[in-house]
Image (cartoon, rainbow, N blue to C red):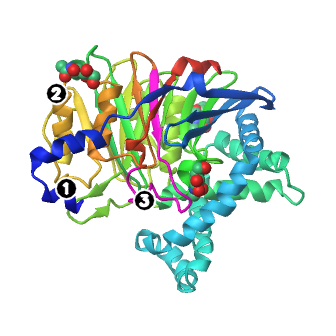
Amino acid sequence: MLLKSALPLFLLSPLLSLSTATPTTYPASSYTTWSPDAAIEKSRLAKISVPLEDGSSIDISRLDLVGSPHERGFASGALLANDIIEFIDVKLNSYFSNELLNLDISSLPLKLQEVLEPIIEKGAEKAPEVFWTAMSFVWEKEKEYVPEAILEEMNGIGEGICAGLTSGDDCNPLEMSMKVKHVNMLPELIRMACTAFGAWGTATPDGNLIQLRALDFGGGPFANYTVLSVHRPEGGGQAFTSLSFPGFVGVVTGVSEKGIGVSEKVWMTYDKRSIQPGSYDGLADVLVIRNILENSSTRAEAEDYLMNVDRTWSIWLGIGDYESQKFDLVGYKQKSAIVYDDTTINTETGQDYIQDVCYVDKHPQPSHADDLPKLLQGYHGNVTFTAVQDIVQQHETGDLHWAAYDFAKKTMILAIGRIDEEGNYGEDGKVWQAHNRPGVVFDLEDLWNGV
Ligand SMILES: *[C@@H]1O[C@H](CO)[C@@H](O)[C@H](O)[C@H]1NC(C)=O
Ligand SMILES: *[C@@H]1O[C@H](CO)[C@@H](O)[C@H](O)[C@H]1NC(C)=O
Ligand SMILES: *[C@@H]1O[C@H](CO)[C@@H](O)[C@H](O)[C@H]1NC(C)=O
């Protein structure tokens, strides 16, 4: 860093272009292995493993979940039982110990603050208890809003875990299901910064929509437990895929068969550096997103749903669809859900208008940076996956993962961060962030057909 700023620009550019060479891409289908043993009824588990030159590999568990909500839950619990327990009981707890100082309890309900304060005072070793107490509090507040099918799926996961554990003698399915429900409330406690944009019309070579969602989350064990779940409900209902973690039913990143892609980021305002007011009286954000992928077939339908649902915490939601090949950002908060397009989004972001591009950068809004609009303007007319790879790398967004969807080719590209044993993205905490890592490209038809 120091060296760079001390050098004149002309000396710097060859250096820069070397270090920012756009990462390679690999086709997922060539690196996907289905194991004959890893099947429960019609559901299956595959491992995607791409060996890389630096000695590391990209590893993703791919779940193909077929059947009723309970059957899909059971299969995902059983097929990933050991991963779920290792992730939830071991890795997350040590992550909680490291994160205790970053947990801002001031935005939590007073009643909960009173419960948490004495535990927090006992220090890092009680950190898991702090988080689990908070998650169970959120669950108790929000559970009445959770749709029946999601409850059935979560119960299925708990039962599946107990059935699938290799050392599961004293596994109680009811307790396990409760644990799954609680941990699914984690995203309601953690605020994720992110970047989202959609580019279409004059901004892309063929005029069709390209959508990005980059998740900036910070370090932790998450990257090593990346799960790509494909839900293929039987007897009606649309298929969708979610890039997530073992045991999680809510969606942070995903796209549906009907051609709806969703991106979200926490809605922080610049001036007060605070989030918009919200409460835990409603449906968790990640379940709202999930409902869109599962139940909306157009952008308009999704937006209509957002206006009517019981909302909790503020996020920016980016929504694109096949039908219109366009993308909106919805300012979603407890009080209202307002739809913005390329011509109106700048009233909230304060950034330049770019025709047929609707975007929100990784910073609190209105943003005081201008690198993302400059990059998008530079690629105007030429936004492709390759351009997206360059844009996320230069904007330094997407540490844990990022994904983009091509709504004409029906493909998805994603990249996952690499972490060391402490959960850091390499020595400087940056080199291995997802935006510096190779991409894996999926043919969405393969996902919808379970191949
Ligand atoms: C999708 O709609 C069905 C039917 O209305 C409902 O049962 C289900 O809970 C919805 N899915 C989600 C995730 O809300
Ligand atoms: C568009 O992007 C491609 C791939 O990144 C590049 O080869 C080409 O030169 C770009 N064209 C324009 C007009 O910028
Ligand atoms: C993540 O996986 C890598 C590669 O297997 C390993 O070296 C690292 O220690 C793991 N980190 C965590 C936090 O699990």
Q: Quadrant of residue 68?
A: top right
- Residue that extends furthest to the right in the rendered view of this protein: 169
User: Horizontal and vertical percent for residue 389?
Assistant: 34, 34
In terms of image quarters, where does ligand 1 lie? top right
Say which amino acid is labelled 3.
Glu
* Dot 3: element: loop
Can residue 280 be seen at all in this image of the molecule? no
Q: Quadrant of residue 345?
A: top left
Q: Which residue is disc 3 drawn over?
A: 427
- The residues bearing labels 3 and 1 have C-alpha atoms spaced at a distance of 18 Å
Q: Which residue is disc 2 drawn over?
A: 355
Question: On the rendered image, what quadrant is the N terminus found in?
Answer: bottom left
Q: Which mark is residue 401?
A: none
Q: Earlier in the sequence, mark 3 or mark 1?
A: 1
Q: Is residue 248 left or right of residue 190?
A: right
The image shows residue 440, relative to residue 450, as above or below, that is: below
The image shows residue 315, relative to residue 97, as above or below, that is: above
Determine the main secondary structure of the stretch shown in magenta: loop
Q: Earlier in the sequence, mark 2 or mark 3?
A: 2
Residue drawn at x 42%, y 28% as measured from the top left: 301
Q: How many marks?
A: 3
Magenta-tinted stretch:
411-431
Judging depth in this view, the residue of 129 and 49 nearest the camera is 49
- Mark 2, ligand 2, within 8 Å: the answer is no
